[in-house]
Image: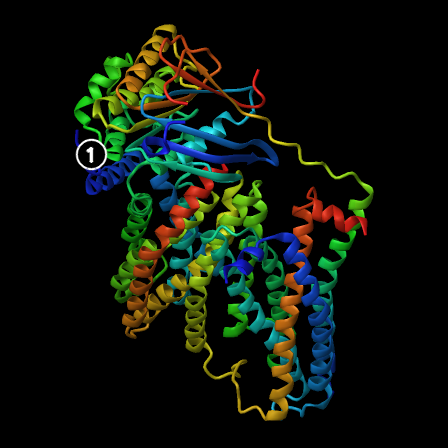
Amino acid sequence: MSNQPPALGAFLGASLRRQLLLAYRRPVDTINPLLFFLLVVTLFPLGIGPDPAQLAEFAPGILWIVALLASLMAAEGMFRQDYEDGSLEQLLLSPQPLYLASLTYTAAHWLVTGVPLTLLSPLFATMLQLPVAALPVLLLSMALGTAILSLVGSIGAALTVSLKRGGMLISLIIVPLYIPVLIFAAGAVRFAAEGFDPAPQLLLLAGMLSLAVALAPFAISAGLRISVDAG
Amino acid sequence: MDGHGVYVWSVVVVSVLVCAGLLVLPARSARRFIAGLSEGEAPAPQAAPSVRIEEVNNAPGS
Amino acid sequence: MTDAADALIAVRGLGLERGGKALLADLDLDIAAGHLVLIEGPNGSGKTTLLRSLAGLSRLGLSGRIEARCDELLYLGHRAGIKQLLTPRENLAWACRSQGWDPVHIDSALDRVGLSGRADLLCQHLSAGQQRRVNLARLHLSFDARHKRSLWLLDEPFTAIDRGGVAALTDTMAQQVRRGGAVVLTSHQDLPLDIPLRRVVLGGGR
Amino acid sequence: MWTWFHKLGSPPWMYRISGRILAILLPLTIAMLVVGAVWGLLYAPMDFKQGNSFRIIYFHVPASVVALAGYYVMAVAGAVSLIWRMKMAEVAMKCAAPVGAALTFLSLLSGAIWGKPTWGTYWVWDARITSMLILFFLYLGVIVLYQAYENKEAAGKACAVLSLVGMVNIPIIYKSVDWWYSLHQPATIRFTEESAMHSSMLQPLLLMILAFYCLFTCALLLNMRSELLRRGASTSWVRGLAVN
């Protein structure tokens, strides 16, 4: 008759594996953001013109704005499937702390959208003539930045999951919160491209990430409880 | 106002409009709501239906 | 009234209001070990809302106090709460991790709900009735886990279940109650049970 | 000590108290606004660099300051409604949002109009104006989220969470925009450069800021009264008001 509390670590590991397994079994959710990224990046030279110098100048901003939109698009449906089939209720009823359980959803979202975006960003960067010197900083800023985008996007997803037209709404309430990430991340890449030292921006990004990791789960858990209750 | 007048006065007009709006709109909607109350018969809150607890074949306790 | 101390869930002066309509007011209810409670009432009288409030899922429009003092709380709602792209075994494995049950019982639980051959089939290939039975398999897992103060909250458990399934389910509920757990369920069917039952009739009753 | 805290929660008491406060504060606010405006527009000396267009700050700066403070008022009210489950705090949060949004809009519009004589264009990506624009989006986010929920109690809770998240982010947004702005346009006039303003220019500005704070309070209380009436339509104290 083991009444000791269920193992937290095993539960979190199982939750993360479950999310990744689900993502693996429905690859379209993983590929969509990447295709979106590629598609939108190719629009810019068509719009601005193929002149390499001009593209290179805009490249950091373009890359980061498109990454932000791709992450936002993927964040919208993060809890929707679990909300509709009732497994979100089971998550809330679990004796495990929701603060950490909701983090597994965000971590899975980052692994499924953030990391692929980061790994493919050098490809998109070269398409936009970004100087090669800036690539390592681009990778680092993407890794840190997409994690913050996932955390903040999860808050928006949790607050709008029970709403029928949640799609448009999540961009209005979340994009303003993405702005500091965009400023410092794009700034870091631009500094690197122009040969300056991007360290301050990257450190600020890391600082914002640690703040987000600590505080976002409170808002995500509260949002989930409200959405399931209001559903 | 050496030529900048038009800008200054347009700001003043906008400010007056916003400040007046902030004060007048809620006050008027409250007054109109109270007026609306006296004529129309507001829906009386129906009491919650009763809850009956029955015991079947001698349940333990209550 | 049983003294509130050993009640698995103590309800004091509970009032529920949804969509501007007062569903019930000032309900006092103690559900202690060995209690089987059936919540009845016409549609829209607040059966599901009451059950979700007991589960702690619903706090909107709630007044009064609900204190749950149980080691384990299981809520089975209208939706099966299982992932279509996972197999019954994977679904239940996650439930075991979440509630602290022993995964070794998964196969026996699936056998008891008549899904022995389908443990590793994606749930999307199962029928609606079968998917509900995967959900019901949780009851057997909870039963095997033998938590002393275990509370089951079941919302219309008999829907889409065949006659044999209903008999098996009522038998499981009887065992849970005899073992010292408690079961609260909502249903339109009358329970073919000889054990003591308390009926909470909402909406002014029949 | 806690009795007034509980009483604060009862709508009829709040309705009466806000009525008495408004009876004093409303005329005072209007007086301050008029005096401040006349003082700033006519009697304060001209700014030697910008000429008379600088007088716009007597409306732009107070609106910006109070709009930002308004967001904090909304977020704190949201926090109180979440933590102590106080209905009145939720009403305060819901009513503070439109007032704050209106003041942010006024700040943006006056900032844009101010841009024309100074920089020759209506929209200038100045740090302060850009931050105001983001604050405007934050306000709209709360207002739209509130409308999106059918169940208004859930709407209140969701908006409380969103406004708290917004409150944590505002300092980060302001600092990042400042850094971003200093990076790109170091040379031009920084709008909020509190250049050594002569006291005769500063005094009307302080009066106007105080007037705008009182304006925010009055607008908030008026909004809350109307909301309390709407929510308590079927209660006796509201019907009592209709009779006399």
Q: Give coordinates of residue C187: x percent, y percent.
A: 46, 17
Q: Is residue D231 above or below residue C82?
A: below
Picture quadrant of residue B49: top right
Residue C197 in percent (x, y) is at: 40, 16
For this view, does C33 lie left or right of residue A45? left
Q: Label 1 is placed on what type of residue?
A: Asn
User: Who's the residue at 46% across and 43% down the image?
Assistant: A226
Q: How is the image coloured?
A: rainbow
Chain containing mark 1 = A
Looking at the rendered structure, the number of numbered marks drawn on it comes to 1
Q: Judge by depth and name the residue closer to the eye, D140 or A89.
A: A89
Work out which residue is located at the far top of the displayed protein and give it. C163
Q: Going by the picture, which residue comes out furthest to the right? A: B39
Residue D12: percent from the left, percent from the top? Answer: 66, 53
Classify mark 1: helix, strand or loop. loop
Quadrant for the N terminus of chain C in the image:
top left
Of residues D47 and D208, which is closer to you in this image?
A: D208
- Residue D120 coordinates in the image, percent (x, y): 62, 78
Q: Picture quarter containing residue A57?
A: bottom left
In depth, the one of D26 and A151 nearer the eye is D26
**Residue for point 45% across, 74% down:** D181
Reading the image, the residue beneath label 1 is: A3
Residue C103 visible somewhere in the drawing: yes
| Image quadrant containing the C terminus of chain C | top right
At 30% across and 24% down in the image, what residue appears? C181
| Vertical position of residue C132 compared to residue A19: above or below | above
Using a 10 Å C-alpha cutoff, classify the residue at mark 1 as few (fewer than 14 neighbours), some (14 to 19) or many (20 or more).
few
